Amino acid sequence: MTPSFHETRLTEARSGRTGGPDPADRTPFERDRDRIMYSAPFRRLAGVTQVAAVRERHLLHNRLTHSLKVGQIGRRMAQRLVKRNKGSWDAGLGQENVEDFPDIVECAGLAHDIGHPPFGHTAEKALGEKMREFEGFEGNAQSFRVVAKLAVLDGVEWGGLDLTRATLNAILKYPRDLDQAKHEIRIDGKPVAWTDRRFGAKWGFYWSEREHFNHARELPGGTHQAEVDRQKRSAAASLMDWADDVSYAVHDLYDYFSSGLTPLHELRGSRDNAEFFQYIEGGIGTKYPNFSMDEFKRAYSDLLPHMPSRKWTGSYQDRHDLDHMMHVVITDFNNAVHPLGTSEIEVDIGSQYRAEVLKQLTHFYVIDRPGLRLIQEGQKEVIRQLFDALMLILAGSDSAVPPLLRDIYSNMKAHEAREGYRRRNDEERQARAVCDYIFLLTEDQALNLLECLKGVAVSQGSIFGAWFG
């Protein structure tokens, strides 16, 4: 069984003291939404890569516009579920609380990428290398850390946004730690299929946030759970994960067809895309449990009639054709969600394969392009150098330490004393503080700060650098 909140106080409970009467007469989950949207870590997503750098001249999605759309898509899916199934399905919230489900899903969608560092997954890998001996770095775990401790909210003494338990649980796309993620989830001895949205392969919280994780996942009356159930997502997290896939699949494809990189108009007449299929067989075909190449090819064929029939020129007709395709596939993906039992969800397998086709087209034609790979290597080096330089500054207790970095480091020690969690040594504490600081930068701020630290273009610099403040 997944964590269930059949009592209003459990659904709405916060770990802090900011849950009193609301002068604006908002529900607890409307307050959660506003807290996320008004937080600095959420706003900075406008300066963080989705696929290509935010400095690109072409109008592309960034992490902020992606997150807004994940929230919107998730909300619409949740509203449909509640409207069609109220009385027989409750999302694990109880019938008295199920009307709050769309708000909870939207909150999770808005916050799901709030922990992504500048340059996105590229920087995530670089920080993971630097933190290998200190539990690593994971964007999903960082998102949970942000809302639990790093974001600033008036009235919260120890940091974080003091979100409701149900919202925190919805943000946990991967409700397990690093050690658990080293082991494959199995049911009855068999690996969980990649299309089972109740589970995920990664991990979603650091050990330092164990107390907040336990708060988010608490069950009424200390209900006992089997090991596999302890790693199961809430219905809201499952739906948010699907909404994330939908937004990624659809909107990235929109970006890169309209910018001339993904030749959808050429694919329409070719059902046997041998090079692409070979790419899939050597990639996800070997990694996804129970992956079917036949099903993937069938999904590819299903999508071909809806693809634009001519090269993008930017005309009204081009925009109409592309919008038509987006409408068709989003409608398909929205209608693919169904109740599973009384509190979980499932997604039609065919729709999941169609979404995967769209995602992998972007990987094949854009993400794995040599040009982008070369740029990403440079981005990794920016993060590595920034990490090393800030570690030296922080270890030296120099007055050059940015005030925010100093505060993060000091608050970390206060959190440890309060929660009884102890890092192994001060080097680990400093490394985590540097990670927290780097992640809070936009890409322009990261580049500008590195220039300042390395003495590059100092004569053109300013005491008010892009990173300052």
Image (spheres, helix red, strand yellow):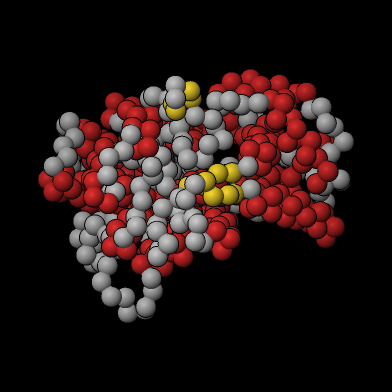
For this rendering, which residue is in front, 456 or 368? 368
Q: Is residue 189 above or below residue 121?
A: above
Quarter where residue 233 is shown: top left
Labels in figure, total: 0
x then y, percent, for residue 58: 67, 51
Q: Residue furthest front?
A: 88
Q: Is residue 81 or residue 44 the one in the foreground?
A: 81
Tell me if residue 175 can be seen: yes
The residue lying at 74 percent from left, 39 percent from top is 262
**In front: 4, or 270?**
4
Where is 350 relative to 291, above or below?
below
Q: Is residue 350 above or below residue 68?
A: above
Q: Which quadrant is home to the N terminus?
A: top left
Residue 348 vs 374, above or below: the answer is below
The quarter of the picture where residue 462 lies is bottom left
Q: Position of residue 197 (x, y in %)?
A: 51, 40
Q: Is residue 372 left or right of residue 272?
A: left
Could one spot residue 315 in this view of the protein? no
Q: In percent of the image, x 44 and y 21: which residue is there? A: 189
Q: Residue at x 44, y 28 (%)?
A: 187
User: Residue 152: horizontal and vertical position, in percent?
Assistant: 30, 59
Image coords of residue 285 (percent x, y): 62, 23
The C terminus appears in which quarter of the rendering?
bottom left
Please give left or right for residue 94 compared with residue 250 in the image.
left
User: Residue at position x 63%, y 20% from top?
Assistant: 282
